[in-house]
Image: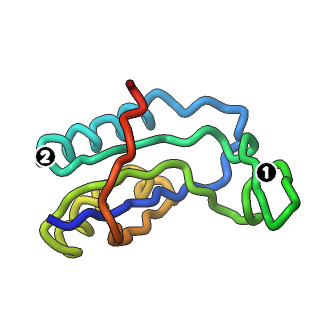
Amino acid sequence: MAQYAILIYDKIPTDDAEPRPEDRAAHDRHAKEIEKRNAMVAAFALEPSTTATSIRGDMVTDGPFIDAKEVIAGFCVIEAADLDSALEIARGNPALQHGGGVEVRPVESWGVARSAVE
């Protein structure tokens, strides 16, 4: 099976606001659906973009890498038979229902160096 990264984009939030409980619940349901398919490899929600630190050459700056109307809010890695199967899974992402988007990319190589839970 091939692996695909699904990058989840959302409009820039107020960044101070916690996700609404109903939004968090929708994402949790979607994750459980992926797990039922035995397709989930990993999934992570990211802290607000205001917590980002970017490095360009020798310069370190606060904030995301680029100014944009959308930011990467989270990502997951799934296993799917092919791109069409990965797209079918990605289409269920709740971000699509409230103006966000997703990007699906094949993962070039497998590998986790170690578990973060060790």
Query: Horizontally, is 95 left or right of 40 in the view?
Result: right
Which amino acid type is marked by label 1?
Gly
Query: Horizontally, is 13 left or right of 3 in the view?
Result: right
Q: Position of residue 81 (x, y in %)?
A: 12, 68
Q: CA distance from mark 1 to mark 2?
A: 35 Å
Residue 103 marker: none
In the structure shown, which secondary structural element does the residue marked by tag 2 occupy?
A: loop
In the structure shown, which secondary structural element does the residue marked by tag 1 occupy?
A: loop
Mark nearer the N terminus (1 vs 2): 2
Which amino acid type is marked by label 2?
Asn
Q: Residue at x 85, y 54 (%)?
A: 60
How many residues crowd mark 1 within 10 Å: few (<14), some (14–19), many (20+)? some
Query: Horizontally, is 45 left or right of 57 in the view?
Result: left
Residues 22 and 5: in front is 5
The reply to whether the C-beta atoms of the residues labelled 1 and 2 are less than 8 Å apart is no
Residue 63 marker: 1
The answer to whether residue 64 is above or below residue 118 is: below
- Write down the residue under mark 2: 38
